[in-house]
Amino acid sequence: MAYEGKGVWCVGEVRHGDLSPSLFELITAGRIIADARSETLTAVLIGKGVAAKADEVAARGADKILVLEHDALDQLVDEAHTGALTAAAGTEKPRTLLFSASVYGRSVAPRVAVALGGAVASDASALTVTDGKLTLERSAFGSAVISTVAVNAADGPEVVTTAPMAFERSGTSETKAEVTQAAVDPASWTQNTEFVSFSADESKEIDLGGAEKIVSGGRGLGNADNFSLIRDLAKSLGAAVGASRAVVDSGWIPYKHQVGLTGRQVRPRLYVACGISGQIQHLAGMKSSDVIVAINTDADCPMMKLATYSVKGDLTQIIPAIVSEIDKVRGSSNGS
Amino acid sequence: MGIHIAVCIKRTPSSTSVAIDESGQIQTAGLPHGINPFDEYAIEEALRIKEKLEGSKVTIISAGAPESEDVVKAALALGADEGVVVTDPAFDGSDTMVTSLILSKTVEKLGDVKLILFGKQTNDGESGHMTALVGARLGRPSISAVRKVTDIDADSITVQRLMDDGADTLKLNLPAVVGVTKEINEPRLPSLKGKMRAKKAAIPKWGAGDIGVDAAVVGKDASPTGVVKMEPVPARTAGTAITGETPEELAKNLVEKLKETKFI
């Protein structure tokens, strides 16, 4: 029997009391679909204590907010979040569910799609609705290729993850979304996973995935001690810290900072590559950044060739000079 | 007590310098192919678990073209016990949703598999969805982005998952599906003995009928998503070289640009 769903759900991610701003990217993406089909857009908040987040979301462009609240949803247990979303979607019958292509989205979205007999597509960087049919663009083959994918979900909803930072975050709207609660019953799903513990990252650094600005360091820094230069510049710019595979493999910085095909794929507004020559695997992870700054001694390396602004020179001299110039500029603008 | 571990691997182009033909389809014929690099960590982790839980068996599953035999043999050379290529013209054009059906039916046919391992993603399609899709298909727990197996026995596996704000530790009852990151281990190289054994090994090929899948529910037409076209990403055009005689001048001129673009 054909599935007749209506409406777009944007599934928000709340981790330890913090709402990920990726929900506002989903709302922008979701509006494209909802407006083209004249359907409503619902922001879904799922977890424990998430009803308190409704105020943050109410005036950000969603028509409705649906709250799935339960102690069993406190942590990310894939089966629990899938179970609660599947039950709610089974009742409400949305035509589209959007998730961010984070660990959360990659874990939950496919399970929801299977449970509801729908379609699943990942990493959308653009969405189009033509005659009611959804197509999306996504990058593949190490960002060498853009694929256009048609979604034809006949027996269930369209489940799509969007590439982090591919859509602008929705601004504030005049109207406030109405909030409703959905029933959550842990007896409705089978759970073979037990949450044991969470160990927080002590560093409190800005996460790469949602970062507006990233400063990355590579082999050109010369040694592990010089990585402090990257942290200095990142701090000065309010940026997240990234790294090339070479320096992660050398143990200068943990894996979670690695940008590239085998690390994180990022799309910041500003990417500053320091001493990174630009191997194809690294470029695959960052070349969609809006503005790229490259600092390198080799003016002919691939990163310098594709950078928006390239600076030829010695990192150990140039980075401190940039940091002090930023201080100077900020100081004078504060004084005036 | 040992367990039966299945590792799902894919044969993919080793280079991303792919060509696209006039009809918008990607041409990978003639390119060097190998094990999807992310899958090497899954194979390695399976071998480490096998070494820990005596009496365990590692079976490699590769769905795709008949040539996938090459990557199954490469995994046998590393120390996997057995392997199977799942291939059928009826599978052509299957999307991730349908591929997950093919893989889960293959796992079911193997019968006694307790742990199914995947790499983080493939280097061609890059969805990273297969772990969760196969978990859901099998009605079993799944977990992605695993950077460490902290404990395993015949009934359960405890793993650490890398999240944006730290690490979650979860315990999954077996059978379970686990997707691993490259942080989890350092893959070994094949031994000469392993290579010899792999060379001689006969790799069975299973088609739709062998895994009990109706040809009507697989392939391009049965897939709820499909690639309409592919285009090369336009190259970034060369930007501006910042000029200056001294580090201070270079810094000043760069910061000027960053101010213009409102980053400072």
Image (cartoon, coloured by chain):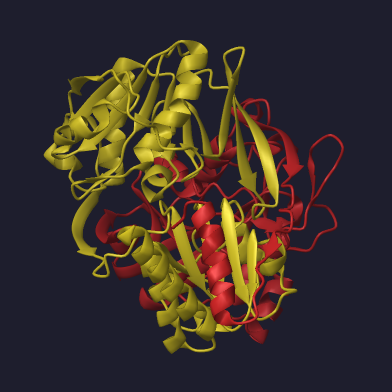
Q: Where is residue A293 in the image (x, y as percent from the top left)?
A: 58, 64
On screen, A159 above or below B130?
Answer: above
Q: Where is residue B77 in the image (x, y as percent from the top left)?
A: 64, 75
Give the chain coloured red: B
The residue lying furthest to the front in this view is A336
Query: In this image, A213 relative to A147: left or right?
Result: left
User: Residue drawn 68% across and 30% down?
Assistant: B220
On screen, A227 above or below B96?
Answer: below
> Can residue A266 be seen from the camera position used here?
no
Q: Colour of chain A?
A: yellow
On screen, B28 above or below A262?
Answer: above
Residue B3: quadrant of the picture: bottom left
Query: In this image, A36 relative to B22: left or right?
Result: left
> Can residue A181 be seen from the camera position used here?
yes
In front here: A262 or A311? A311
Report the number of discs: 0
In front here: A30 or B50? A30
